[in-house]
Image (cartoon, rainbow, N blue to C red):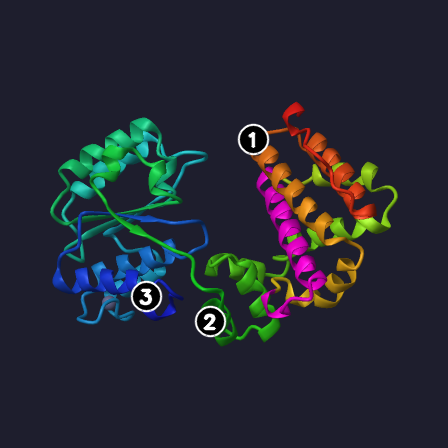
Amino acid sequence: MNWDIVIGHTDTIQNLKAMLGAGRMPHALLFAGPEGIGKTLVANILSAALLCSDSIRPCGSCLSCRQMIQGVHPDFTLVQPDGASIRIEQIRALQHQVSLVPYLAGRRVIIIENSEKMTAQAANSLLKILEEPPEHAVFILIAAGKQMLLDTVLSRCLVVPFYPVPWQQLAVALVDRGYPQEQAEVAARLGNGRMGTALHLLEPDGMRLRDKAFEFLTALHSSENLLWTAPAEWEKFNRPEIIAILRHCSLLLRDMLVYSLVLDTAVVFNLDLSRQLAEQAAYWRQTSLLSAFKEITIAEKAVYANGNIRLIIEALLIKLRELAKGGMHVAGSSWSTI
Ligand SMILES: [Zn+2]
């Protein structure tokens, strides 16, 4: 475990190393950024560095580093949601733990994952600790966004934002890890600037939601029974998965538009489906692709807003079938009735 395994986030790491080197680490940091972007990885390496006894930190070989790698360091605490939230009892237990003198490293490091899931009582309890933190304690809060935390907690933290990494950088890193060039490039482009997401896409069934989206779009032209079969199939997925499938649909339509406009195919996301996408693009008018794109965005918002999945997918299907058939523009939208 060392800094070299982090892809991107160069400035962030430089700043953290500078604070570490100068011995000026704040008592509380908030790592903010979307899931899969690398916050937890950087938090773990920073924790190891804070606890390491060597001059080049983390060295990976001192007793502290070895215990961190094994997940048994006595001065390191990881707090995660217990079910849907982080409860006040967990923060009370933490309060007792951080008050104890460090056992091995001269410091105690606490990572609070998904800190936006703290209940109001838990957050207020943490605030009390952060108002008068023990000299030896460093808290690293991890959250999807800083706006999800109480302002009072936020005011006690140094906010460290994590931004998407350029896909080219992700692709190079994935090839370095042994993934074939094309697979690496597709995962890097679809990964949305997040190494964790790109790696997830490269797992054995990592592309199943993308493939589902492609199957759905292809069936618009080929399956007469789609209106009866598709809504029931979509209901088998949970809401985040449905949103992911709809996003993949948008990207696939966007790629088809690239082919239909005969633009530079270097900007295609789903490179591995180039031939099929070029074939599919021939079925659509450009204006229909744009309208379909818009309908999918509206459906995505309806899923977000807790709309009825079956009704949303049925309505989307009717509109997409119409667009796919003749490229006829569907005026207005009826989502407000769902
Ligand atoms: Zn070490």
* Residue position marked by numbered label 1 in the rendering: 305
Magenta extent: 239-267
**Which quadrant of the view contains residue 319?**
top right
Quadrant containing ligand 1? bottom left
Q: Residue 317 has which mark? A: none
Give the number of callouts. Answer: 3
For label 3, being within 8 Å of ligand 1 is answered no
Instruction: Name the secondary structure under disc 2.
Output: helix
Q: Is residue 229 left or right of residue 118?
A: right
Tell whether position 266 is magenta.
Answer: yes
Does any portion of residue 84 appear in the rendered image? yes
**Which quadrant of the view contains residue 154?**
top left
- Between the C-alphas of marks 1 and 3, the distance is 37 Å
Q: Of label 3 and label 2, which has the lower sequence position?
A: 3
Which corner quadrant holds the C terminus?
A: top right
Residue 146 in the image: state x and y as whole percent. 33, 42
Number of other residues with Cα within 10 Å of mark 1, as a class: few under 14, some 14 to 19, many 20 or more: few
- Between the C-alphas of marks 2 and 1, the distance is 37 Å
Q: Is residue 98 left or right of residue 2?
A: left
Tell whether position 218 is magenta.
Answer: no
- Give me the residue at 69% from left, 45% from top: 292
Q: Residue 10 has which mark? A: 3
Q: Is residue 263 left or right of residue 99?
A: right
Q: Looking at numbered disc 2 in the image, what kind of residue is underneath it? A: Ala
- Between the C-alphas of marks 3 and 2, the distance is 14 Å
- Give me the residue at 32% from left, 67% from top: 3
Number of other residues with Cα within 10 Å of mark 2, as a class: few under 14, some 14 to 19, many 20 or more: some
- Give me the residue at 69% from left, 66% from top: 262
